[in-house]
Image (tube, rainbow, N blue to C red):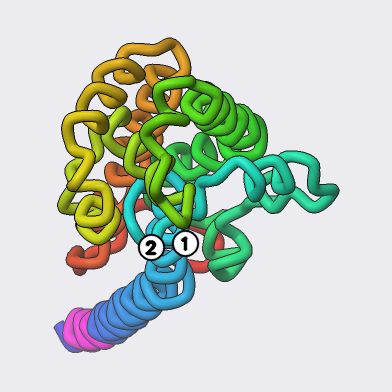
Amino acid sequence: MVWDNIIFTILGGLISGLVGLFIEWWRERIRLKKKHFKDIKRKCLKPILEGLHDLRKEFEFREGGPEWDLVKLRETLKSEFRWWEFFSFKRYADTLLYEDLRNHFPDLYQELQNIELWVKNEFMTYLQSIYELLKLIDSDPEFKEFIKGFHNQIIPLKAVLFSSLGVDKSEWPNIYLQVKHKLNELIYLQNKFYNSVETQKVREITNHMIITIDRCIKRIEEILLETKLRGKCKYL
C-alpha cells in the first residue's frame, strides 16, 4: 500500500510536470505564430499591397496617370533600361517572408508570381499596343481637323484616347472641359475608334490586368484582417 502511494505520487508529479511543459510549449508556439504572422503582415503583405497599387496605376487611363503620348512612349520602347524586365514583388517585401507565402497562402503566392511573369514578358506588348492606338488616332485626317485651335495637341489626343477606351469623363474632367466645345467631333472620333482592333487590344489587356491586380489587393486586405496563421513552415 505504501509503495502504491509512492508510485502514484511519482506518476502524478511526472504527469503534472509533463502537462506543465506541454502548456508552456503550446503557449510559446502560439506566441511565435502570432509574431510570425505579424511579421508577414508588416514586412511582406503591406509592402506588396503598396506595390500592387503602384502597378495598377500603369493600367489606369485618367488625369494624373501615365503620360500616354507618342514621343514618350517611343522613347520608353527604345530605352535600354526597361523596368518591367526586372519587376518583382521581392523589391517591396522581405525576400524570405515573400517566399514563405507559398507555405501559408499558396493561392496568393501563385497569383503574385503570375503577375510578375506577365509584367516581365508582356508589359512591352501592352505599351506597344497603346503606341499603335495613339499612332492610329494621330494619323487620322479627321483627328487632324479636330485638333485645330488647340495650343497643346496632347490634350485632344488624350481626350480621344480616353473616350475611345470607354473611360468615364469623371476620370479626366479638366481635359473634358478643354475639349467640350468640340463635343460633337469628339463623340464622332470616339465612335470611329471604339471598335478598332488597336482599341480592343488595349481595352482587353487593361481590363484583364486591373481585374487580376484587384483580386490580389482584395485577397491581401482579407488576410490582413485574419488573426490565425494557416499552414506550416520552417520558422515555426
Camera sees residue 10: no
Circle count: 2
Amino acid type of disc 1? Gly
Q: Secondary structure at mark 1?
A: helix
C-alpha span from label 2 to label 1 = 18 Å
The structure residue drawn at horizontal position 66% and vertical position 31%, both measured from the top left corner, is: 121
Q: Main secondary structure of the magenta part?
A: helix
- Picture coordinates of residue 112 (x, y %)? 47, 44
Depth check, mark 2 against mark 1: the one in front is 2
Provide the residue span drawn in magenta. 3-13
Mark linked to residue 21: none
Residue 122 location, quadrant: top right
Tag 2 residue: 64
Residue most toward the right?
Answer: 80
- Residue position marked by numbered label 1 in the rendering: 51
What's under tag 2, amino acid-wise?
Gly
Q: Nearer the viewer, residue 215 or 180?
A: 180
